[in-house]
Amino acid sequence: MSRATQQVEEVVIRFAGDSGDGMQLTGGRFTDTTAIVGNDLSTLPDFPAEIRAPAGSLAGVSAFQIKFSSKDIHTPGDTPDVLVAMNPAALQVHQKEVKPGGTIICNANAFTPKNLKLAGYETNPLEDKTLDDYFTLYSIEMGKMVTLACEGLDLSSKIVDRSKNLYALGLLFWIYDRPLQPTKDWLEVKFGKKPELVEANVRSLEAGYNYGDTTEIFTTRYKVDKANLPPGKYRNIMGNNALSMGLAAAAEKSKLGMFFGGYPITPASDILHTLSAWKHLGIKTFQAEDEIAGITSVIGAAFTGGLGVTATSGPGIALKSEAMGLAVIAELPLVVINVQRGGPSTGLPTKTEQSDLLQAMYCRNGEAPLPVLASSTPGDCFFAAYEACRIAVKYMTPVVLLTDGYLANGSEPWQIPALKDLPDFKVKFADKSNISDGQFMAYLRNKDTLARPWAIPGTKGLEHRIGGIEKEDVTGNVNYDPDNHHHMVKTREQKVKNIANEFDPTEIFGKKSGDLLILSWGGTMGACRSAAEALQDEKFKVSHLNLRWLNPFPNDLGEILIKFKNVLIPEINNGQLIKMIRAEYLVDAKGLNLVRGKPISSDDIQHTVKEMIG
Amino acid sequence: MADSKTKSNQTQSPEEILATVVNHALDGNDVPLNTLDNKVIKAKAKAMIVRINKGTAERPEMPTNSTQVETTTSAPSAYTRKDFTSDQAVRWCPGCGDYSILAQTQKVFPDLGRKKEDFVFVSGIGCSSRFPYYMDTFGFHTIHGRAPAVATGVKLANPDLSVWVVTGDGDSLSIGGNHTIHMLRRNLDLNVMLFNNRIYGLTKGQYSPTSEVGKVTKSTPMGSLDGPFNPLSLALGAGATFVSRTLDKESKHMQDIINQSYNHKGTSFIEIYQNCNIFNDGAFSSLTDRDTKSDTVLLLEDGQPMVFGAEKNKGIRLDGNIPKVFEFGDKLNIDDALVHDKKDYIIASLLANMTYNPDFPDPLGVFYAIDMPTYEDLIVDQINDAIKKKPKGSVQQLLDSGDNWVVK
């Protein structure tokens, strides 16, 4: 059967269904296959905090969005071209965001009177024609189809019904011309011990694909060419996974034993899970009794010469704050990861936000500066984690690494780095050469970095005591002298400032001067870059700068800022970086602050820029 | 070895002694230098070593009459109390029970047979937690209540170290209660010294979680209302594998308990009754006064009947399941006394429950000691198993794993 094939540059698909419908799995499979066929892509999972909200309810809707393209993209897309809605609630929640003229594919079997009522529909939208004027609607009896496809298998109807997400996946694979084999292989690994289950899922997947192929309902297939990515070996990667690999890379390159102490918290737990599975790399993981023990055990490990890392989210940082201060004054290297989520308090545990920057900067008692950096894409979490470890050890300081829920669970194609190309990470523990006049000087600093020596228990002759009471510089003895305290406050601040001396010159996307600079940090990088690209295409004199380091700022940042007539800082918070920038540089920057638990869109940024300089 | 050192010194000139200790020190054996009584030679030797290390002086020739034993014997047995005494002035109030605990520790440590660089003291906040500053070992004075968690990280990062937690009743049972119970259930090979003075000393005299009900303090002018924790019952309930108690004034007893604690593999919990002579003076006076202590203290010995009293004429027996104090007489005698068995959890629980009970003496000694696998050993075993199953890979293999594709 010949069918029209339409070439498109990029597509945004959103899979939505009940929490139990397997939407994250469906999205994940579509993503991996899309990566393999060579498109650039970006994903955004969006799931409720409740593990299983009541079936069919609006609160229980889980979604996964993917944007894939033949060109370089930076965001998971703003409005979907295609919505797959597995029940009325999913349609109700997501339909209003679908592009006008877009496609909606529904599982008709789930549109029962009970489910319609739960979703707040008085009449069935698949039948009352309300959607027809705006969208191309496909109402498919997926439940019935999978039941027929799985006839003869020794499985309950409930189990068979669960495979309808694979049916939807198969159909989308047909529409977008993607191979089934990677998903079949994956099912084999995932359910290999239950052959009947593999069979049911494969049959449903094929049934969906064949439905597209054989019925004439779908008049067009779409083709998205391979993206023009730099040559190299690629894989798809999620942020938390990339971050874990970055930590493991740091442990291997530094030859330090990695010790990870943490307490389960959304959306950071995957880092604990991932590292726990890598025992064959010699990584020690410790699920502590609480957040405080998570970090204090890491401080103990750091004192002992381990590469100490803890990961949490905002509420966990609040609990760890006192211990972070201890690490500052004890001048011990460790990495504290905050996978940010919506706050305050429990807030929006499964939604993304950038509202912990000021917490990272200032949440401790006393003058307790520490380096803060942020990763900007899922794959970048690898490099940010590696850099955080390297700086922590080189400067003997705790380092805060900020990511967020969007980066943690989002994914993108990733050029696999070679470990040998990463920056050097040599570590030298203190030894006898650090003893002078028979005494080991625990706070005798390196002149360039101001780092103190790392003297670990078990080293003969270096017995010494450290702690949370103010230290005398050089000796490390307890000291209450006013001038020494002033000196130490300044020294700890200077030590952090010194890190900026090793930064490369700041890269600007676009010209070095102009009408407006979009200044971003963390997960909003992609949307800002997309906006800058679009605006530059429209000949606006707009550039984009993304900050890797929030503390210290790059030495050249002040000079860059004054070369632009306007500075716009989009953040998913109520204006945090903007406060730091205004305070440091006295620049009249403007904010774009949308705090909705989801990424800021490129459209929002473009619109704001045009309002400012249009 | 200390003896042989002294003998050789007597036959050597000051110059020869200097050359001998410097050579040994440069070869990695500091003991002859550290044990030198002659302060002048000691100072000269240290200065010489610094100059040699800097390259501004030549290494002296080793005298021919120096004994060879010194360079080959392992160092530990030659330690003295001084080797464990730091250069920091001790700042507890005069008369504080902490002085005795420090003294007993410094007395016991030289003979434990362990290199001193392998000892780590970790403490929280409070008077007791200043302890690490006074021990010339590795030490970490951390934050309030968190010493067990910091010590856990130390031990897991390097299981070869001998790790000691020094804490107080407020530190370990109030603000750090959670860490204490979880440390105990995990059974890392840690030694915990809980200085229990039943008061907050450093913050100047508020009641603590071990203060008796009705305690009048600055924060409880009409008397405290909440009942105290019983530290040993808590430890037993949390799954501790070594539970003991000693008293600041019983120096020999304390030395013995510290020794047993060191030799127990697993978390060793020592409650040390400690007098705060400023804010809670006399809290344990009935256990320390010569006139009363034989009737108020029950010294536990494994395998021995529980007997106390000035005339050794009183014992603990079980009446059904209920422990009772009895005097030896016509009907009941020493054979009726309960025999202590440190492996018996029920007996340990009975003994722990005598705390705060005026009808019973306060037991001192090892209440409970059993062997259980330690957490750090289990972690290392899992890692070794994982490496066996999946030969120790590189991170590059990890990066390259999974579905990947090449863009040309």
Image (spheres, grey):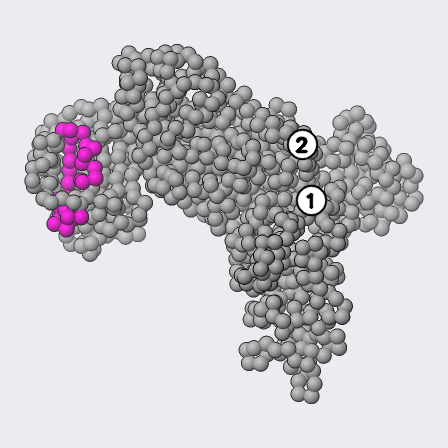
| Chain for disc number 2 | A
Q: Which quarter of the image is occupied by the N terminus of chain A?
A: top left
- Residue occupying image coordinates x 12% and y 49%: A112
What percent of the width, then of the height, locates residue A146?
16, 47
The amino acid type, in three-letter code, at marker 2 is: Pro
| Chain for disc number 1 | B
- Residue occupying image coordinates x 24% and y 51%: A54
Q: Is residue A111 magenta?
A: yes
Q: How many marks?
A: 2
What percent of the width, then of the height, locates residue B353?
58, 69
Instruction: Locate residue A251 relative to residue B316 in the image: left or right.
Output: left
Asked whether the viewer can see residue A603, the reply is yes
Q: Which mark is residue A214?
A: none
Q: Do badges 1 and 2 share one subunit? A: no
Asked whether the viewer can see residue A38, the reply is no
Q: Which mark is residue A482?
A: 2
User: Crowding at label 1, few (<14), some or many (≥20) Cα neighbours within 10 Å?
Assistant: many
The residue range painted magenta reads A91-118
- Residue occupying image coordinates x 65% and y 56%: B195
The amino acid type, in three-letter code, at marker 1 is: Tyr
Compared to A31, does B185 lie above or below? below
For label 2, the SS is helix
Say which of marks 1 and 2 sits in front.
Answer: 2
Q: Which mark is residue B133?
A: 1
Q: Is residue A425 magenta?
A: no
Instruction: Locate residue B241 relative to residue A50 in the image: left or right.
Output: right
Dividing the picture into quarters, in which one does residue A312 lie? Answer: top left
Instruction: Locate residue A131 relative to residue A381 in the image: left or right.
Output: left
Q: Which quarter of the image is occupied by the C terminus of chain A?
A: top left
What percent of the width, then of the height, locates residue A473?
67, 31
